Every structure is written in C-alpha cells, then in structure tokens.
C-alpha cells in the first residue's frame, strides 16, 4: 500500500491517510478482502503515531470501506460497484467544481471555461 504523508499540509495526517486509502479502494488498487498493514507496522513505515493510523482505520471502517476483525486485522470491505462508481463520480464533480472556481477567480467566464474543457476532452 502506497501512502505519502505531507507534514507541511494543513490537512491532518489521519485525514491524509484516510483519503489516500479511500482512493486506492475506489480505484481498485486495493481489492475487496485485501488486508491492510497492521496498525503498528504501518505507523512505523509512515513514521507516525500508531494512534493516528488507528484513527484513520476507524474512520475507514465507519465509512464502510474497511472491516476490522479483532485479532486478525483490517481488510477492504466488500464494495457495491454502484457505490464505488458513485463515489468516483462525486470525487470528479468536486474536482471539477474546484477547477471552475479557480478559473472564475482567474477572470475566466463560462464560455472560456467550456472552451478549455472541450479542448481537454478532445485531447483525452
């Protein structure tokens, strides 16, 4: 599992961990039933507190993405493919909304933004 902590970020470390694991689950990098590293080993790997990792795992479990079996570890929960698709769509909408907000702050109008989006869609 690949997680990068940005210590200079204003986002709390546990939220960084949660978001990166969530993305890996939604993208299918982490598959259903796959085990997550133990709290202690992951904390050592990331050089953060075990309590921070525990808090992240608890949040992922609360969100239904992870299941913890006492004494065995934490595993990626079974996901409904429809829910996963909806989560990806929501994430894309949030990113696009942020991009539009930045474009408007830069002085672009709706037509300029549409033109840029059309160019991006044609390239990709």
Image (tube, rainbow, N blue to C red):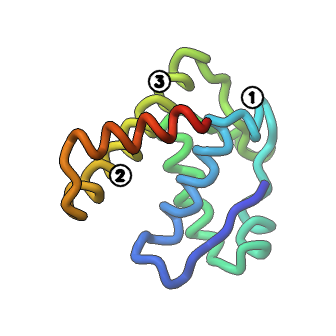
The crowd level at tag 1 (other Cα within 10 Å; few <14, some 14-19, many 20+) is: some
In the image, 28: left or right of 62?
right
**What residue lies at 75% left-to-right and 65% top-to-bottom?**
42
**What residue lies at 72% left-to-right and 73% top-to-bottom?**
46
Above or below, 88 against 24 in this view is: above
In the image, 98: left or right of 20?
left
Q: Quadrant of residue 43?
A: bottom right
Between discs 1 and 3, the one toward the N terminus: 1
In the image, 115: left or right of 29?
left
Residue 86 numbered tag: 3
**What residue lies at 62% left-to-right and 72% top-to-bottom?**
5
The crowd level at tag 2 (other Cα within 10 Å; few <14, some 14-19, many 20+) is: few
The crowd level at tag 3 (other Cα within 10 Å; few <14, some 14-19, many 20+) is: few
Q: Are marks 1 and 3 in contact (CB under 8 Å)?
A: no
Along the line of sight, the residue nearer the viewer: 117 or 4 = 117
Could you say where residue 99 lies in the image, as x and y percent from the top left? Answer: 35, 51
Along the line of sight, the residue nearer the viewer: 79 or 100 = 100
């Amino acid at each position: 599992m690949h997680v990068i902590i940005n210590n200079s970020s204003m986002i709390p470390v546990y939220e960084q961990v949660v978001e990166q694991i969530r993305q890996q689950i939604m993208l299918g990098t982490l598959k259903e039933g796959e085990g997550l590293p133990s709290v202690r080993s992951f904390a050592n790997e990331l050089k953060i507190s075990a309590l921070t990792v525990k808090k992240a795992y608890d949040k992922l479990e609360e969100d239904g993405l992870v299941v913890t079996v006492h004494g065995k570890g934490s595993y990626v929960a079974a996901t409904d493919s429809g829910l996963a698709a909806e989560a990806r769509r929501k994430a894309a909408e949030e990113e696009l909304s942020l991009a539009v907000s930045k474009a408007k702050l830069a002085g672009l109008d709706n037509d300029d933004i549409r033109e840029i989006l059309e160019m991006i869609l044609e390239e990709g």
